[in-house]
Amino acid sequence: MTIQRSLLAAAVALASASSFAANPDAGKATVESVCAACHGITGISAAGGFPNLAGQKEEYLRNALTAYRAGTRKAAVMNNMAASLTDQQIGDIAAYLSSLKRCE
């Protein structure tokens, strides 16, 4: 029973350490300074070559940015842009962009 309790405590501690509360306001600031040139401050791109991100699902955005950062999803510009983002920043960006009204 003691080993099971120890394993459970370790699992809970690990899960807590890797989880965080996303902050859409911080995400907006990061979007304004890092993402806006291509994707727009409101997640609506002014240029046809860049996708609109406003209203995209939060989990999708988080997974995509994490994959760009890791290099498992290839796009030279995005790999470079995402390389320095922390997990917190990725979560914040995803929370902000997913909260915006989708372009129709």
Image (cartoon, helix red, strand yellow):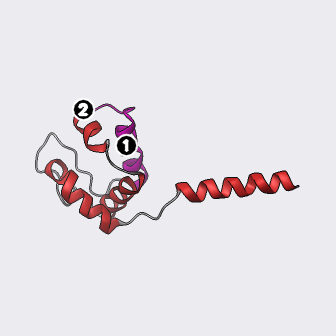
Q: Examine the structure image and report whether residue 46 is included in the region drawn in magenta.
A: no
Distance of label 1 from label 2 (alpha carbons)? 14 Å
For disc 1, the neighbor class at 10 Å (few under 14, some 14 to 19, many from 20) is some
Image quarter for residue 24?
bottom left
Residue 56 percent location from the top left of the image: 33, 53
Residue 87 percent location from the top left of the image: 42, 52
Q: Residue at x 13, y 42 (%)?
A: 48
Q: Is residue 93 toward the left or the right of residue 1 in the image?
A: left
Q: Secondary structure at mark 2?
A: helix
Q: Is residue 81 toward the left or the right of residue 94 in the image?
A: left
Residues drawn in magenta: 58-76
Q: Nearer the viewer, residue 75 or 89?
A: 89
Q: Residue at x 31, y 31 (%)?
A: 74
Identify the amino acid type marked 1.
Ala
Image quarter for residue 25?
bottom left
Residue hosting label 2: 76
Q: Nearer the viewer, residue 90 or 47?
A: 90
Residue hosting label 1: 64
- Label of residue 47 in the image: none
Q: Quadrant of the C terminus?
A: bottom left
